[in-house]
């Protein structure tokens, strides 16, 4: 049965249960279905042909979460827009995805030039209607824009078919989500880990607990876990790196399932963290946005030896609906133990970047595998497979970094820095700080200059997580044996 | 310790961590008002405060630090 009917049934079967806890307030599925219906009615009024992609301002409130389901019931695609991101970046996303209408729960419309906003907090109650219209499973459920190399974000569309295949796989990993579960949702809606963090609980009739924006995340997550006895938590590893100095204060026996994704997870911190969650199944997972949230998983064991490479916990095997291989330069599959690029195929793989033939040409390829012609996505992640068929993560094959789980093209930052500095060369490197979290270091090839104006400029162009946190100056960039800038050497500038 | 002394020490810690002094310490000041005071530098500031004042915050204390006034209150209870 199509996913959208499962969503309808789950809501209708749980009307008296709590669906959300947002900003100290509970909302039942009954209240949720009312708000969904109100928003849906206003969506029905807009022209259907012009509005296949609809913008969604990512506030932390019930209307924003209701907007997603309202759009889906109408067979439409949501494109999240973070109001804290620079205007130029959001405008680029709006233009690229031809957005004409934006659903906005703010009191005044955040985006007001050249498009209409539906202010979702100000709609009258109407009759509840959760019956979806008929639409193809190949319709996009959402498009997320990720960092692109030339300063232009690129859109990753995920279809309802991708999403239902993901949900089937996730439910095998984390079975029996039910109305007694309390589920952590710590992610900004522009990040795809948010999708599993609201959708998996809704499908099980559980309650979603969101973390307020503009708060120090890690300490709030802990308080929420303890005070509200959360049972299922999905997080990025940087959270436990931050919490590490306080592990002796944390005891959450109610957590039954804890999943990590989005960044490299280190075994030493995980082994200590496990003691804070004595009853939880702990799983490390992996997946680019292009293959729908996560597609490989590895169960942590507190009795057996866990697999690692350079201290990083194994990312395990494919879940239900993907097939991944490690390939060399010629797209040939490599032998066990050999490091190459991880490539993923299967029902969770996006149909391709949004209106971007060039990127699609570079990132997807067809290959004869097991007597079938299969389409693979190049992840840009270097991995190898061990004798048991488990994948181990080695690093990036290109110049990407993961900052707080967000994927960042270092060249996009360099592009903006250079456009400001005018003819001065600059390089960004990913550096690991004392907490094992990744930061962005910027090296400028010049005498020391005042960096405040540069940083102010960057803040108008890039989201906060892409702003370099440490800046160094060097008279001349060191070169490696290939005559390229030696990024590894530049990275050592930051190891104080 | 007098509130004024705490303010002075705090000012130095912020200036050293953030590498600028474009802020005026008052009770209503929040991280949002100060350039460069994000979740990352917040960590460092907290650690510096613990070192300088010889105190240790509890995880729950961190959620109460909505502004500088609240921060000073929490520091005072620990001295």
Image (tube, coloured by chain):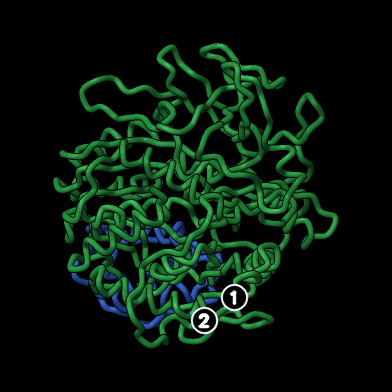
Q: Which residue is mark 1?
A: A101
Residue B28's x, y, as percent?
38, 83
In the figure, is residue A36 to the left or right of A290? left
Pointer 1 with pointer 2, Cβ within 8 A: yes
Front-lying residue, A446 or A1? A1
The 10 Å Cα crowd at callout 2, few under 14, some 14 to 19, many 20 or more, is: some
Residue A215's x, y, as percent?
37, 67
Front-lying residue, A162 or A328? A162
Q: Could one spot residue A202 in this view of the protein?
A: yes
The extreme right residue here reads A423
Q: Quadrant of residue A490?
A: top right
Name the residue at 40% across, 14% down. Answer: A388
Mark 2: which secondary structure? strand
Name the residue at 60% across, 58% down. Answer: A467
Distance from disc 1 to disc 2, alpha carbons, whole Å, reads 7 Å
The earlier-in-sequence mark between 1 and 2 is 1
Name the residue at 48% across, 32% down. Answer: A322
Chain painted green? A
Q: Quadrant of residue A18?
A: bottom left
Residue A7's x, y, as percent?
35, 57
Mark 1: which secondary structure? strand
Q: Chain of mark 2?
A: A
Name the residue at 59% across, 75% down. Answer: A101
Does mark 2 fall on the same chain as mark 1?
yes
Q: Could one spot residue A451 in this view of the protein?
A: no
- Specify the label residue A118 is tagged with: 2
Q: Is residue A224 above or below residue A200?
A: below
Q: Chain B's colour?
A: blue
């Amino acid at each position: 049965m199509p996913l959208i009917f499962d969503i309808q049934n789950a809501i209708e079967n749980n009307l008296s249960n709590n669906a959300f806890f947002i900003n100290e307030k509970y909302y039942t599925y009954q209240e949720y279905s009312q708000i969904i219906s109100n928003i849906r009615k206003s969506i029905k009024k807009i022209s259907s042909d012009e509005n296949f992609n609809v913008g969604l301002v990512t506030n932390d409130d019930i209307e924003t979460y209701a907007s997603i389901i309202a759009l889906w019931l109408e067979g439409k695609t949501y494109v999240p827009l973070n109001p804290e991101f620079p205007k130029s970046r959001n405008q680029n996303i709006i233009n690229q995805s031809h957005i004409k209408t934006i659903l906005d729960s703010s009191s005044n419309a955040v985006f007001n030039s050249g498009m209409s906003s539906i202010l979702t907090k100000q709609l009258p109650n109407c009759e509840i209607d959760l019956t979806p219209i008929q639409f193809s499973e190949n319709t996009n459920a959402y498009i997320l824009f990720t960092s692109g190399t030339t300063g232009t974000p690129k859109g990753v569309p995920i279809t309802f078919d991708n999403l239902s295949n993901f949900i089937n796989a996730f439910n095998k990993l984390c079975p029996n989500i039910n109305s007694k579960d309390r589920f952590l949702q710590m992610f900004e809606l522009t990040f795809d880990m948010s999708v599993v963090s609201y959708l998996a609980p809704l499908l099980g009739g559980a309650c979603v607990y969101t973390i307020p924006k503009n708060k120090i995340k890690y300490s709030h997550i802990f308080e929420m876990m303890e005070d509200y006895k959360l049972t299922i938590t999905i997080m990025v590893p940087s959270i436990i790196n931050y919490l590490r100095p306080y592990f002796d204060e944390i005891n959450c026996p109610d957590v039954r399932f804890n999943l990590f994704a989005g960044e490299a997870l280190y075994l030493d911190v995980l082994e200590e963290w496990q003691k804070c969650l004595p009853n939880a199944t702990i799983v490390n997972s992996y997946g680019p946005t292009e293959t729908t949230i996560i597609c490989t998983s590895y169960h942590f064991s507190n009795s057996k030896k866990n697999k690692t490479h350079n201290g990083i916990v194994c990312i395990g095997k494919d879940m239900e609906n993907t097939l991944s291989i490690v390939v060399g330069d010629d797209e040939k599959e490599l032998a066990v133990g050999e490091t190459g690029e991880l490539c993923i195929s299967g029902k969770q793989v996006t149909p391709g970047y949004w209106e971007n033939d060039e990127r699609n040409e570079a990132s997807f390829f067809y290959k004869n595998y097991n007597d079938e012609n299969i389409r693979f996505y190049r992840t840009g992640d270097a991995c190898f497979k061990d004798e048991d068929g488990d994948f181990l993560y080695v690093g990036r094959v290109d110049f990407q970094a993961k900052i707080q789980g967000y994927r960042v093209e270092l060249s996009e930052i360099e592009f903006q820095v250079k456009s400001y500095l005018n003819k001065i060369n600059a390089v960004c490197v990913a550096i690991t700080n004392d907490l094992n979290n990744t930061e962005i270091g910027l090296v400028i090839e010049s005498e020391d200059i005042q960096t405040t104006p540069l940083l102010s400029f960057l803040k108008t162009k890039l989201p906060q997580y892409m702003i370099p946190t440490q800046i160094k100056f060097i008279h001349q960039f060191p070169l490696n044996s290939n005559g390229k800038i030696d990024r590894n050497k530049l990275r050592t500038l930051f190891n104080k | 310790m007098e509130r004024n002394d705490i303010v002075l020490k705090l000012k130095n810690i912020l200036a050293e961590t953030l590498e600028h002094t474009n802020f005026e310490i008052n009770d209503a000041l929040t991280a949002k008002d100060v350039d460069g005071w994000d979740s990352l530098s917040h960590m460092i500031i907290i650690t510096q405060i613990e070192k300088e004042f010889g105190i240790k915050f509890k995880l729950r204390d961190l959620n109460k630090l909505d502004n500088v006034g609240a921060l000073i209150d929490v520091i005072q209870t620990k001295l």
